[in-house]
Structures are given as C-alpha cells and as structure tokens.
Image (cartoon, rainbow, N blue to C red):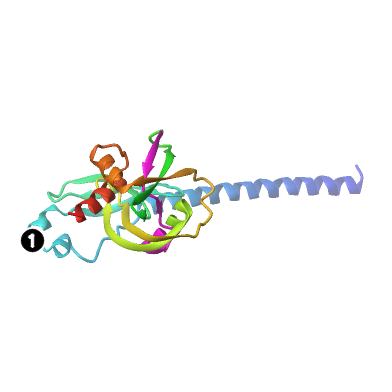
Amino acid sequence: MTYRSLVMVRVKSNLGVLIGTLGCFIFFLSQDMIKEAKDLCWGMKCTMSDKSIQQKTGRIEDASLEEQCIEKEIVFSGRMLRMDRDRIRLPNGVETTREVVRHPGAVGILPFKGEELILVRQYRYPIEEITLEIPAGKLDPGEEPLTCAVRELREETGYRGTLEHLVSIYTTPGFTDEIIHLYKATDLVWDPLQTDEDEFLNVESVPWAMAKEMALAGEYKDAKTILGILMLAGKEK
C-alpha cells in the first residue's frame, strides 16, 4: 500500500470517527433540549393576578370560591391558540387539573349602512356549516381592540366608520380565556383592505328590523351575532 493510500485510509477513518462523535453529540444535545423543553412545559410557574377574587368583586363570600394555580403545563401551542393543563387547588384543598384554551382575544362589529346591518356569510370548518355573522376577527399580538375592529371592518366589508364600544364578554369562561369586544359602526365610508389569504366570505346587507326578528327566531347560530343584535335592540326601548 502506498503512502498516499495510507493517508487516505487514515483520513477516512478519522472522518468516520469525527462524524460518529458529532452524531452522538447532536443526539445527546437534542435529548437534553427535549428534556429541558419538557421540564419548562411541565414546571412553569403560575402567574396569578395581583388582586384576589374578593378584591376584584368586592364580595367577601367570593373568597371561598377561588381556585389557586399550582403548576402549568403547555400541551399545545399553535398559530391561533394555546392549550394549557394546569394543576390547581380547589377551595376545599383538593388538587385537580384544569384544561384551558388560551386565546389572544377578538372583536366583533355591527356595521350600519342606513337602516341595514352588514353581515358576512362564511364557511366555518369546526362545525362544517355556513354561518351568517357580524364581521369579526382576532387581535394581533399587542394590538388594541379598537385598532383591530377598524382593521377587520375594512378587511371584511370594505368600510371604515365611527366605532362605539358596546360590551366585552368572555365567550366560554368554563374552558377558555377568549374575550371578544363588540362595537357598533356607523357613518360608513368605502375604504377597503385586502382580506386574509385564508378567508373567504360573502357580504350581505339585512334590514335592521329583519335582523332583530331573525335573532329572536333563533336563525343565527353565532353567539356574538345574537348578543350584539339583541343588545342594540334592547337599547332602542
């Protein structure tokens, strides 16, 4: 075997050792990272409000209803929401878990063009149905509700207008912290924005009297739409 051949064999041998060593290093590093990520997810400290339930509500008896978070676990984190599994302590001292969907919040707008309410018809994948709803959308990170309402109104209907805050509600407080802020929009002016790439909808105008009748008859399947219409209808009395 020539000197050159010996050198090549030695280089190949050393390269194989190097690759093997590097592979082992990456494997164990990845295992440590996975373990660290799991530890972070399982051992997250709870961030509770500075105020107690009693301080928030002003009712002494409410103190006996409060549940205390002991530890948090992030089960899933996606593009729009996050799911936590929290270990909590009940008022009687018993420990259990709560599964909570964390949501950035959303807005809904009731836009009026004269005596007509502008609604949007769209396909809702989770329920596999077409729904007729008020324009709505989720808040971007750090976005104020009013700013979001202006943007969503322009994206979904093509209009901007004067917005009045109606109410802010938790949609389903039993398992999610999603809050939705409802607005009334008037003095509409055509000023469209490009809709989201994954959003397909048709805009419809419904006479206000008919919109109220439809809400009372249970023809809407969307809770925020029903609430918004009935709230405004109640203010007319």
The single residue placed furthest to the front in the displayed view is 114
- Front-most of 146 and 33? 146
Position of residue 51 measured from the top left corner of the image (x, y, whole percent): 20, 65
Residue that label 1 marks: 60
- Give, as a three-letter code, the residue at label 1: Ile
Position of residue 178 measured from the top left corner of the image (x, y, whole percent): 32, 51
- Front-most of 33 and 99? 99
The image shows a total of numbered marks equal to: 1
Q: Can the viewer see residue 99?
A: no
Q: Can the viewer see residue 169?
A: yes
Q: Quadrant of residue 166?
A: bottom left
Residue at 30% over, 44% down: 211
Asked if the magenta segment contains residue 157, the reply would be: no
Q: Quadrant of residue 75?
A: top left
* Region in magenta: 129-151
- Front-most of 156 and 188? 188
Asked if the magenta segment contains residue 145, the reply would be: yes
Residue at 28% over, 51% down: 228
Secondary element type, mark 1: helix
Position of residue 21 measured from the top left corner of the image (x, y, whole percent): 64, 49
- Front-most of 236 and 44? 236
Q: In which quarter of the image is the N terminus?
A: top right
Up-down relation of residue 162 to residue 24 (above or below): below
Q: In which quarter of the image is residue 44?
A: bottom left
Residue at 92% over, 45% down: 2
